[in-house]
Amino acid sequence: MSQTSVVLKSRDFPRLLKEIQDPPEQLYIHGSLPQNTPSLAIVGTRKASREGIRIAEEFAEYFAAMGIAIISGLAMGIDTAAHKGSLNQGGVTVAVLGTNLEVIYPAANTKLAEKIVRGGGALISEYFSSELPHKSNFLRRNRIISGLSSAVLIVEAPQRSGSLATARFAAEQGREVFVVPGPIRDVNYAGSHDLIRDGAVLVSSPEQLAEDMGWRELRRSLRSADLQEDLGIDEELIIDALKKEGMPLRVDNIIELAKLEPRVASVALTALVIKGLIVEDTAGYKLK
């Protein structure tokens, strides 16, 4: 496997990772590390339920579509779901290994590791190719997962889950820790609930996490940019009117401000709702 390396003192060393208390002296990289982009770590149990896997994929897909890098550890269960969710949206994802880059663990994720690199992401490790795998390495690599990330999301963590160590490292590094709650008697969520009691932020949807991290505007601007070329002139006039007023508008107000015929305005409003750029509530239409 071809790889590059970057030392701690290098200008190319990840900025966020430089800030932690115990950064690796050197990183070995296969692929490309994302630069100057927000990043979210998504981690959890290896023995994940179907619901936990679905949730991890859903969050990863949501944030990958925003251009946010997804960081995880290539383990089975939640980690695998997070990487796959990002790839489903054509996003960039980074796998931090507890082994050297010549040893993909678990071996069942070898093809996934290849997809991560082909998708523009990276496999990274602090261990040289001659260093043998050791159980303690997987605990230490968790500080890199959190250290590379703007925030950490815990999905389905039992009380003895390694993801709790990632949460602890994140807290020490000043990263925000988010937790998806689960059934109170489900042992797979016992560690998750302990984190919430200790002050981690409970989230039940990607939108809540995006709001808390200030990423909603990023999603909105990216979506608007993606759809801009598809907007008709009438739709653009409505968007401009809503932006200018900065408040929900009723149909008659939109017709007046955008100077559109009622039928034309109705068609354009319907199209904008379908495209997800505006929503209608009791106060009228507003930007989403």
Image (spheres, helix red, strand yellow):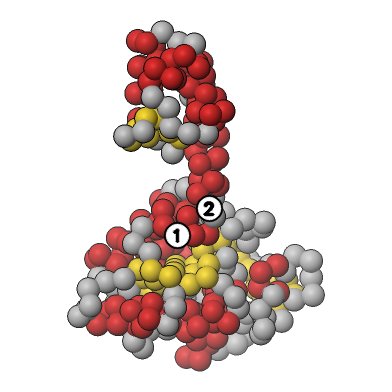
Q: Residue furthest top?
A: 261
The residue under label 2 is 215
- Describe residue 209's horizontal placement relative to residue 76 as left or right: right
- Any mark on residue 233, and which? none
- Helix, strand, or loop for circle 1? helix
Residue 56 left/right relative to 92: left
Question: Residue 135: horizontal and vertical position, in percent?
Answer: 47, 91
Q: In terms of depth relative to the viewer, which is nearer, 215 or 231? A: 215
Decide which of 9, 190 is in the foreground and name it. Answer: 190
Do residues under tags 2 and 1 come within 8 Å of each other at their CB atoms?
Answer: yes
Closest to the observer, 161 or 239: 239
Residue 98 visible somewhere in the drawing: no
Give me the residue at 44% from left, 75% from top. 200
- Could you tell whether 15 is left or right of 46 in the image? right
Which residue is labeled 1 in the image? 209
Percent position of residue 214, x then y? 54, 55
> Residue visible at 56% across and 72% down?
175
286 relative to 266, above or below: below
**Kind of residue at badge 1:** Leu
Q: x and y percent of residue 217 in the render? A: 54, 46
Residue at 54% of width from left, 79% of height from top? 171
Asked which secondary structure carries label 2, the reply is loop
Q: The residue under label 2 is which amino acid type?
A: Trp
- Quadrant position of the N terminus in the picture: bottom right
- Which quadrant of the figure has residue 253? top left
Residue 215 seen in the figure: yes
